[in-house]
């Protein structure tokens, strides 16, 4: 495939005009001013368009699309006890599959090709992402309130092993797209023994750890009350940071927590919509970024966002850090875009993803810039971050394969998916 005469965001996050991009064997073959030999290749006209790396969403619970709007406005404990737990008790693997497929539609339409995701029945719902042409780092977050509980007897452990087995059985066709990460849900949902075991497992297997850290002020302070340490420092004591850690939210970190995260090359997933909607606060990302922390961007699940639109999240991240820091260039737009692309890819261990660069996997999105709200196209990146809508995305490609084009998902039957998702939701409700 060749995309001819297109404006691109290059590997240094600078905009370059009139480029020709050739893609072969899932990768960027060449990115040049000169036109490569079109012999035997499909050629797309890139005039009036802008190509940039696709988004990597570093925090999601994708099957929870089916819980969108279910239990709005309830305080956390009532929401969990009266809505979420009874629903999840009847949320079969097949229903999760349809929830994930519905989420995949939203994700690819907003330019996202890969998610870090925490939920249950990883093989079943991972299949939906795989079929959609996406990538995902999937994990089952340990929740265990019993002092003597063992991680190795928990379904989180078994579910992770099941996905690792699936990866072995499907190694060739999967080609690293669907991956298993380790996970504990949070400090407050677990006891020390099981946490230590989960962290040992991650270190022994060389897995990334996904978790929630310091999402609310109450959680952060209560952890100090229980253990005399903040969640970050408690996890450090238990050995979490022997592995690469992706910590969702991080709204209430102390300066010392940020230092621990930086020293261990841990990554924050910034989830601004979720933090605002649930009243958790606004993470001081400008301060964290100045201190040197790795910042990436995630949507969180559809029961706390309530959509999976990565472009919206990028916009909100840029707006909030400016308002909070009272600085019109608090984090430059190129840095925000980098956090949502290359930063996310690195957080997922995908070192050859997230840049428009020769030899890298061809994960990219194309915006149609011939739109009233993107005219004039004087400062392209600020147009993307502050003006663009996800409906301006006319192409999403993952590993060199076009998975979404001109309003249509190429590997998802949209009508069927919406109908099955609606039906799955109703069946769960009927069975509660
Ligand atoms: Zn979450």
Image: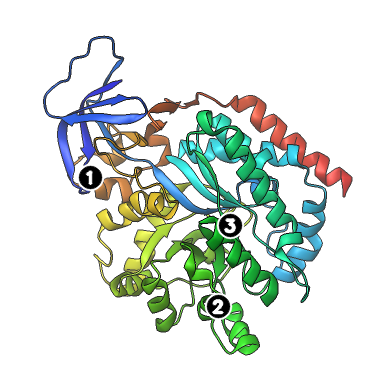
Q: Please, which residue is most extreme toward the left here?
A: 34
* Label 1 CA crowd tier, 10 Å (few <14, some 14–19, many 20+): some
x and y percentages locating residue 11 in the rendered image: 22, 45
| Disc 3 Cβ-to-ligand 1 distance below 8 Å | no
User: Comparing marks 3 and 2, which lies closer to the viewer?
Assistant: 3
Total marks shown come to 3
x and y percentages locating residue 129 in the rendered image: 57, 36
> Element at badge 2?
helix
What residue did someone put label 1 on? 11
What residue did someone put label 3 on? 182
Q: CA distance from mark 3 to mark 1?
A: 30 Å
x 69%, y 56%: residue: 157
x and y percentages locating residue 372 in the rendered image: 29, 36
User: Comparing marks 3 and 1, which lies closer to the viewer?
Assistant: 3
The image quadrant that residue 283 belongs to is: bottom left
Looking at marks 3 and 1 on the same chain, the residue that comes earlier in the sequence is marked by 1
Taking depth in this image into account, of 5 and 21 the one nearest to the observer is: 21
In the drawing, does residue 340 fall left or right of residue 304? left
Task: Indicate whether 310 appears above or below 257.
Answer: above
What residue did someone put label 2 on? 231
Q: CA distance from mark 1 to mark 2?
A: 36 Å
Q: CA distance from mark 3 to mark 2?
A: 18 Å
Q: Which mark is residue 272?
A: none
x 38%, y 65%: residue: 320
x and y percentages locating residue 309 in the rendered image: 48, 46
């Amino acid at each position: 495939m060749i995309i001819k005469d297109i404006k691109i965001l290059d590997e240094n996050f600078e905009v370059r005009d009139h480029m020709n991009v050739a893609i072969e064997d899932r990768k960027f073959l060449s990115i040049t001013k000169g036109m490569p030999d079109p012999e035997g290749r499909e050629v797309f006209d890139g005039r009036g368009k802008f190509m940039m790396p696709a988004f990597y969403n570093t925090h999601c619970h994708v099957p929870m699309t089916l819980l969108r709007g279910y239990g709005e406005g309830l305080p956390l404990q009532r929401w969990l006890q009266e809505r979420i737990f009874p629903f999840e008790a009847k949320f079969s693997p097949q229903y999760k599959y349809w929830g994930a497929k519905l989420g995949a539609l939203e994700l690819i339409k907003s330019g996202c090709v890969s998610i870090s995701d925490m939920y249950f029945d990883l093989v079943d719902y991972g299949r939906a992402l795989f079929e959609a042409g996406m990538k995902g780092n999937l994990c089952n977050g340990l929740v265990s309130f019993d002092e003597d509980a063992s991680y190795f007897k928990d379904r989180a452990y078994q579910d992770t092993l099941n996905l690792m087995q699936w990866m072995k059985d499907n190694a060739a066709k999967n080609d690293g797209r669907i991956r298993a990460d380790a996970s504990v849900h949070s400090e407050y949902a677990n006891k020390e023994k099981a946490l230590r075991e989960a962290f040992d497992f991650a270190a022994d297997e060389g897995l990334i750890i996904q978790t929630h850290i310091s999402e609310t002020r109450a959680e952060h302070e209560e952890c100090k009350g229980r253990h005399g340490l903040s969640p970050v420092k408690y996890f450090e004591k238990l050995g979490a940071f022997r592995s690469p850690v992706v910590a969702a939210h991080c709204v209430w970190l102390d300066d010392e927590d940020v230092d621990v995260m930086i020293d261990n090359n841990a990554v924050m997933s910034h989830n601004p919509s979720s933090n605002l909607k649930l009243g958790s606060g606004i993470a001081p990302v400008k301060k964290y970024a100045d201190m040197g922390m790795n910042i990436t961007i995630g949507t969180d699940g559809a029961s706390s966002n309530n959509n999976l639109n990565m472009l919206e999240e990028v916009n909100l991240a840029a707006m909030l850090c400016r308002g909070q820091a009272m600085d019109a260039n608090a984090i430059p737009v190129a840095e925000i875009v980098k956090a949502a692309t290359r930063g996310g890819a690195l957080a997922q261990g995908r070192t050859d993803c997230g840049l428009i660069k020769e030899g890298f996997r061809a994960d990219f999105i194309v915006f149609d810039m011939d739109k009233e709200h993107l005219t004039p196209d004087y400062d392209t990146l600020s147009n993307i971050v502050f003006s663009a809508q996800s409906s301006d995305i006319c192409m999403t490609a993952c590993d060199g394969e076009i998975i979404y084009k001109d309003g249509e998902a190429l590997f998802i039957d949209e009508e069927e998916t919406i109908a099955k998702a609606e039906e799955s939701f109703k069946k769960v409700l009927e069975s509660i």
